[in-house]
Image (tube, rainbow, N blue to C red):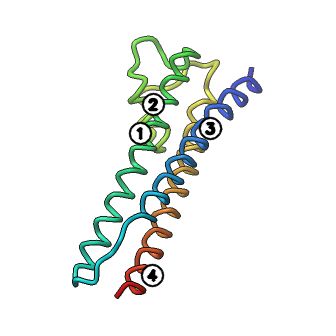
């Protein structure tokens, strides 16, 4: 049964990796089309780009959490009556309140979600940093 949990967790993680890559490509594509004016508002422009990037990535994370909650539903991984979206958020963000725990036969699914969440948050951090760096470079060239 442990192998099956790992397979299911890996499959859900793979779906989320695909989702995150699509959002990453969308963010990069969207920001390539942003033009900068040399009107002295570079701080506002940079802030706008960063806020947009962060919001888009937060949307990606939220959708990935929904994917985990759907997996919990399909597998009956949480006790009956549990709020699956809350359970998914707590696992994905590694918050781990412990007030909802997976049923015994799905005990690896929470750590799998946490591992996926850590990876996706690290990825988002790298994207935010790259967008910041590229935006500053583009602003410098357009000034």
Do residues under tags 1 and 2 come within 8 Å of each other at their CB atoms? yes
Q: Is residue 89 left or right of residue 20?
A: left
Q: Earlier in the sequence, mark 1 or mark 3?
A: 3
What residue did someone put label 2 on?
A: 66
Mark whose residue sits in front, 1 or 4: 4
What residue did someone put label 4 on?
A: 137
Tell me the CA gap for discs 1 and 2.
Answer: 6 Å
Q: Earlier in the sequence, mark 2 or mark 3?
A: 3
Badge 3 marks a residue whose secondary structure is: helix
What residue did someone put label 3 on?
A: 13
Badge 1 marks a residue whose secondary structure is: helix
Give the image location of residue 107, x and y in percent: 61, 26
Tell me the CA gap for discs 4 and 3.
Answer: 34 Å
Tell me the CA gap for discs 4 and 2.
Answer: 36 Å
What quarter of the picture does the C terminus occupy?
Answer: bottom left
The residue at 58%/43% (across/down) is 116
Compared to residue 103, the image places residue 13 above or below, namely below
């Amino acid at each position: 049964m442990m192998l099956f949990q790992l397979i299911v967790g890996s499959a859900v993680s793979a779906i989320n990796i695909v989702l995150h890559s699509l959002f990453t490509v969308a963010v990069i594509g969207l920001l390539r089309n942003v033009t900068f004016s040399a009107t002295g508002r570079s701080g506002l422009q940079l802030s706008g780009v960063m806020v947009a990037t962060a919001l888009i990535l937060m949307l990606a994370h939220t959708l990935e959490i929904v994917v985990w909650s759907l997996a919990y539903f399909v597998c009956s991984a949480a006790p009956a009556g549990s709020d699956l979206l809350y359970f998914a958020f707590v696992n994905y963000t590694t918050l781990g309140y412990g007030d909802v725990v997976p049923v015994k036969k799905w005990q690896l699914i929470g750590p799998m979600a946490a591992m996926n969440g850590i990876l996706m948050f690290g990825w988002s951090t790298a994207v935010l940093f790259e967008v910041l760096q590229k935006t500053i470079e583009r602003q410098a060239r357009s000034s």
